[in-house]
Amino acid sequence: MAAVSLQQLRKVYPDGHVAVAGASVEIADGELLVLVGPSGCGKTTLLRMIAGLESISSGTLGIDGRVVNEVAPKDRDIAMVFQNYALYPHMTVAENLGFGLRLRGHAQADIDRRVAAAAQALELESRLGARPAALSGGQRQRVALGRALVRDPKVFLLDEPLSNLDAKLRLSMRVEIARLHRRLGATMIYVTHDQIEAMTLGQRIVVLDGGVIQQIDTPMNLYQRPANLFVAGFVGSPAMNLLRGTLRKPRDWVLATAQGEVALGPSLPQPGWQAWAGRDVVLGVRPEHLQPQESAPPALQAVLEVVEPVGNEIFLNLRYGAQPLVSRVPPRALPAPGCTLALGLVAQQLHLFDPASGSRIEA
């Protein structure tokens, strides 16, 4: 396997559109790195630049210590898995798995050995004689993975490989990919628009928006310490609640919003936030840290509009004036929609952002 180095990679199309703007990432040997972001953010373009399927406008791409900007895709020693499987319908599973090796002139004995090993790793031994039409979606995706696996490449590139699967298959295939990565110790770069997929698979995650890297971090750091408003709103399901207002301290600290004052208490969780007194800020609170309460004075009151039970938890969709909010609570008896709920904040779990730059305000 190999490390991958991206130094200020940039992709500009002839019409002037900047698809990727100065991306720099160091991917360790054996790491599973996920590129995530909304449609059009540049994640697939960046992956295709690594694969050699898109030219690099500027910057340096290194694989295993070698600069490969001008190296043909077939000579980069990478294997790519696409979302549409790209299996040959007239070939059996075994023939699909071994096709790339045959093109490269491998001996039949070597092909048979590699195909058998990949089939065993992906639990496809009983389907080697079947054609793609006879396979389930999950089995087809495993064949696509196996076709990359038999190559024994330095780097695996996966472009939204689970997007065509239903929810149950996506879950099982996520586990398959994570298990395969642990077994192989392979360097993998995985593209997805699904932030749940990114959080559960990635050892580190690169969040992109508009071709610009917004944050590179571990899944839990992204969730607990988002670098800016985009990451705060993108990572997490449901998304973080974001309230705009002015930080004030008439007696206790409050956030004065267009909907009313949100009580924050006599002291701020981060002492450094006091420097923002009298200034506009964006307060961020995760749904699990916005909870109905009856005993203590509430931080705010909001109207319950929709209750979404999802089994082990319940989402409360609320309206605070014109501001939508979401609370995540354990299963329990709840009042009917239309009532007003008193809500408290978990002070130590609040986030503060600069509304002008979008950047996180540190303590």
Image: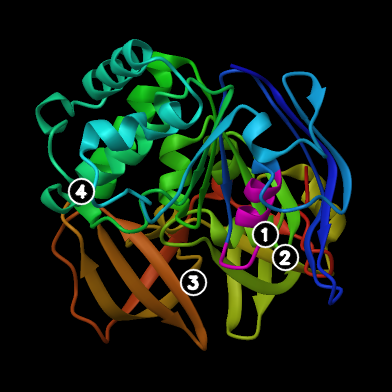
Task: Give the quadrant of the C terminus.
Answer: top right
Q: Nearer the viewer, residue 43 or 327?
A: 43
- Mark 1 to mark 3: distance in Å? 39 Å
Element type where label 3 sits in the image: strand
231 horizontally vs 24: left or right: left
Q: Which mark is residue 42?
A: 1
Residues under numbered marks 3 and 4 in contact, where contact means CB atoms less than 8 Å apart: no
What is the span of residues highlighted in magenta in the rendered image? 38-49
- Mark 1 to mark 2: distance in Å? 7 Å
Please name the amino acid that badge 4 sits on: Pro
Residue at image mark 4? 132
Please name the amino acid that badge 3 sits on: Leu
Q: What residue do we see at 72% from left, 38% from top?
A: 72
Residue at image mark 3? 300
- Mark 3 to mark 4: distance in Å? 56 Å
- Mark 2 to mark 3: distance in Å? 35 Å
